[in-house]
Structures are given as C-alpha cells and as structure tokens.
Image (tube, rainbow, N blue to C red):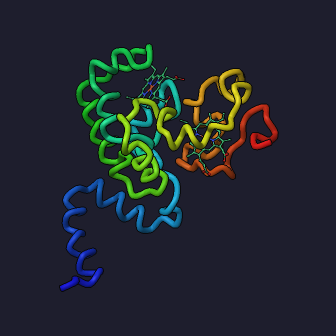
Amino acid sequence: MKKPLFTLVLAGLPLLAGSAMAEESFSQWLFTLDRMKEFRPVDNETYAEECGACHFAYPPGLLLAMSWQKLLDPVALEDHFGENAELGEDTLAEIQAYVIENSAENSYYKRARKITRSVQSIEPPLRITQVPYIKRKHHELTAAMVRDNPEVGSLSNCNACHTQAEQAVFDDDSVQVPNFQHWDE
Ligand code: HEC
Ligand code: HEC
C-alpha cells in the first residue's frame, strides 16, 4: 500500500533531528523563500575566518564532500595551491565537519544540487572553477574580463564580480564585471 506523503515526511523528521546542523539547515531551507535557488551562505565563524583569510570563503555547497576531504587533508593543506594553509587539529576538525555537512550532495539548495549532478560522471575536481557547471556558466568570459582584469585576476575570485557572493547569491542579475559595462555583449 502506498503511504501518504505526510507520513513519509514525518517519518523522516527524527532522522534529521539526529543532527542539530542537519535540522537547522532543513528548517532554514524550509523557511527560506530562495530555497529553490543558490547556495546556503557560510554560517560558521571558524570557517569564514580561516578559509576566508586569503580568498572569498566559498560556500561548502560549491563542492562535493570528496573534494573537500581531499582539500582539507592535513598534508594537502601544507601545500594548498602553492600556499601553506595548515590548521590546528581542533580547528581543522570543526571545519571538516562543517563543510562535509553542507557539501553539495548534502545540501537542499538548487545550485548545490546542480553542482552534484554536474560532477556525477567525473572525478570530483579540487577546484570549484573546474566543476563543469561552473565552467559552463563562465565560458563566455574573456581573458580581458578575468585573468588580465586588474580587479579580478582569477575566476577563483568569485566576489570580484558577484556582488552578493557573501550571501551565496550568484544570480546573473547581481553580476558586475569590474571595468566592463556589459559582460554579455
Ligand atoms: C594562505 C592562503 C590561503 C588560505 C588560508 C586558504 N586558501 Fe584556499 N586558496 C589559496 C590560493 C592561493 C588558491 C588558488 C587561487 C587561484 O588559483 O586563483 C586557493 C584556492 C582554493 C580553492 C579552489 C578555488 C577554485 O579555483 O575553484 C578552494 C576550494 C579553496 N582554496 C578552499 C580553501 C579552504 C576550504 C580553506 C580553509 C581551510 C582555504 N582555502 C584557505 C590560498 C589560501
Ligand atoms: C570575472 C567575473 C566573474 C568571476 C570572477 C566569477 N563569475 Fe560567476 N558569473 C560571471 C558572469 C558574467 C556570469 C553570468 C554568465 C551568463 O549568464 O552568461 C556568471 C554566472 C555564474 C553563475 C550562474 C548564475 C545564473 O544566474 O545562472 C554561477 C553559479 C556563478 N557564476 C558562480 C561563480 C563562482 C562560484 C565563482 C567563483 C569560484 C564565480 N562565479 C566567479 C562572472 C564571474
């Protein structure tokens, strides 16, 4: 016999309640009007501070857990894209738990789900800028707009162009490429 939908939903609630974070993200998702779009904004201070020290603190929903695990390996962090981004044991453990809990495949947000789908048949990349969905969205941008643009320099600098990146909003309505009036012409 087919169970009514609400029974299934109720049956799922204790599972979610098992983790305070999961419960929080579920209710946050449930009551956010934008839940069908974008990513969950960064809401862990340790992560924001440590992983936002050299660049924009990327919302965890931009990569799969497997990618985060590789990036956040203690040895890997000693040579993180040519920089030393080592962390103390407790700090690293907190950051690992936070990003894995909110990684693309564990996120309810629509763009996070697109990221997951986009890397399904490939080795999960270490770079967000290597995720096919992200690459596709930027394929029209020229070197003059990105690499050779003194106010951008690299596609990794999301917040150079996405004016609401801090809120994890990447909608093309909120894009402003510095030194370019129209990026789509
Ligand atoms: C000491 C400076 C530094 C710190 C601290 C740091 N990073 Fe980075 N990170 C870099 C550099 C440099 C790059 C390469 C940027 C580029 O290619 O333009 C990078 C790139 C990345 C990328 C790939 C971005 C892309 O191109 O898609 C991710 C993901 C990332 N960092 C995550 C983190 C996380 C998570 C932390 C916290 C544990 C962290 N970073 C801390 C310097 C740092
Ligand atoms: C040089 C400026 C620039 C940088 C840097 C940049 N973007 Fe973009 N991004 C754009 C533009 C312009 C568009 C709109 C492209 C289009 O609609 O054709 C876009 C589109 C997007 C979209 C799709 C928006 C939509 O409405 O469908 C996402 C998601 C996105 N960017 C995420 C990122 C992330 C994550 C980063 C950093 C890793 C990043 N972008 C870095 C300029 C930039």
* 77 or 45: nearer the viewer: 77
At a point 54% along the width and 48% down the height, the residue shown is 167
Query: Hey, which quadrant is residue 143 in on the image?
Result: top right
Give above or below for 96 relative to 80. Answer: below
**Number of numbered discs present?**
0
- Quarter the C terminus occupies: top right
- Asked if one can make out residue 40 in the rendered structure from this viewpoint, the answer is no
Image point (47%, 37%), residue name: 131
The residue depicted at 78 percent of the width and 31 percent of the height is 179
Q: Is residue 114 left or right of residue 185?
A: left
> Please, which residue is most extreme toward the front here?
121
- Is residue 41 found left or right of 74 in the rendered image? right
Measured as percent of width and height from the top left, residue 116 is found at 40, 48
Q: Quadrant of residue 146?
A: top right
**Residue 69 percent location from the top left of the image:** 29, 33
Is any part of residue 169 visible from this angle?
yes
147 vs 21, nearest the viewer: 147
Relative to residue 31, is residue 117 depicted above or below? above
Residue 38 is situated, as x and y percent measured from the top left of the image, at 52, 53
From this view, report whether residue 54 is shown above or below residue 31: above
Identify the residue at horizontal 28%, vertical 30% (top origin).
Answer: 92
Q: Quadrant of ligand 1?
A: top left
**Residue 165 locus on image (x, y percent):** 57, 43
Closest to the observer, 90 or 181: 181
Q: Where the N terminus falls, by quadrant?
A: bottom left
